[in-house]
Structure formats: structure tokens, C-alpha cells
Amino acid sequence: QVQLVESGGGLVQPGGSLRLSCVASGTTFSGSAMGWFRQAPGKGREFVTAIGPTFGSTMTADSVKGRFTISRDNAKNTLYLQMNNLKTEDTAVYYCAVHGRGNYYYASNYDDWGQGTQVTVSS
């Protein structure tokens, strides 16, 4: 059974930084593409960024490009999301997920999800 556990969320001021982590178990982590999504109150789940399994190729939403960086440590079965220059509109619950098929942008193409970690950007 796949288990994903996110951590690292919290309250930060605009312009600040956070690093989220997602530890995976029960899956061949190194062989799986992984993604980060977020969901703000009253909105749908939004693609943030994804990383391929082998060569670490990445895709990132325009809304966070240049500010957020995805990375992975296959030896630790851990996925990361470094978030810099945070804005109030980045406030959301952030989820990591195991990619299953197709386009990285669609949440329906991911098979397993973590429970999420809250990120609040506010002064």
C-alpha cells in the first residue's frame, strides 16, 4: 500500500520561503514520476510542478515558475518542493502525488495522494 506523508507547511510572510517534503513508502519511488498540487479554499486542485523518475526532468506551472523548485532524493524516497518569494495567492493545502499515466497537469492522472500540508502566506 502506497503511503505519502507531506511535511514542512506553515505560516510565512509574503516574500518568505518554505521547503515541503514528501516521504513515500510502499512504492518504487525511484521509478515513479511525482507531482505537487495545491488546493485553495473553494477552488479545485491545481497542478504546481512534477518531476520525472529517471533523469529528473521537470514541468512547472507558469504561476510558480522561477519561484518554486521540485527535486527528489531517491535514496531517501523523498520528494521536495522549495518555495521562494511566496505570495498570498500561494496559500493552499499542498499535496504530493504519484503519477500514473498521461499528462502531468491533470490530477486524474495521479494514482496515490498524501494527506496534504497547509501553507499560509500572510503578513
Image (cartoon, rainbow, N blue to C red):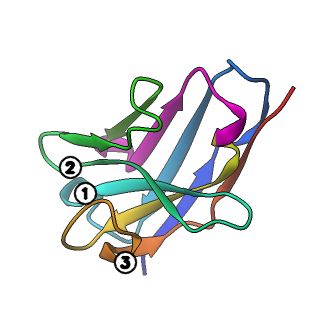
In the displayed structure, would residue 5 be above or below residue 109?
A: above
Q: Is residue 8 in view?
A: no
Q: Secondary structure at mark 2?
A: loop
The earlier-in-sequence mark between 3 and 2 is 2
According to the image, label 2 marks what residue? 52
Query: What's under tag 3, amino acid-wise?
Result: Ser
Q: Bounds of the magenta span?
A: 74-89
**Rendering coords of residue 73 (x, y %):** 34, 39
Q: Of circles 3 and 2, which is in front? A: 3
According to the image, label 1 marks what residue? 33
Can residue 57 be found in the magenta stretch? no
Find residue 42 and report its image quarter.
bottom right
Left-right relation of 73 to 36: left
CA distance for labels 3 and 2: 17 Å
Query: What's under tag 2, amino acid-wise?
Result: Gly
The earlier-in-sequence mark between 2 and 1 is 1
Can residue 85 be found in the magenta stretch? yes
In the displayed structure, would residue 102 be above or below residue 85?
A: below
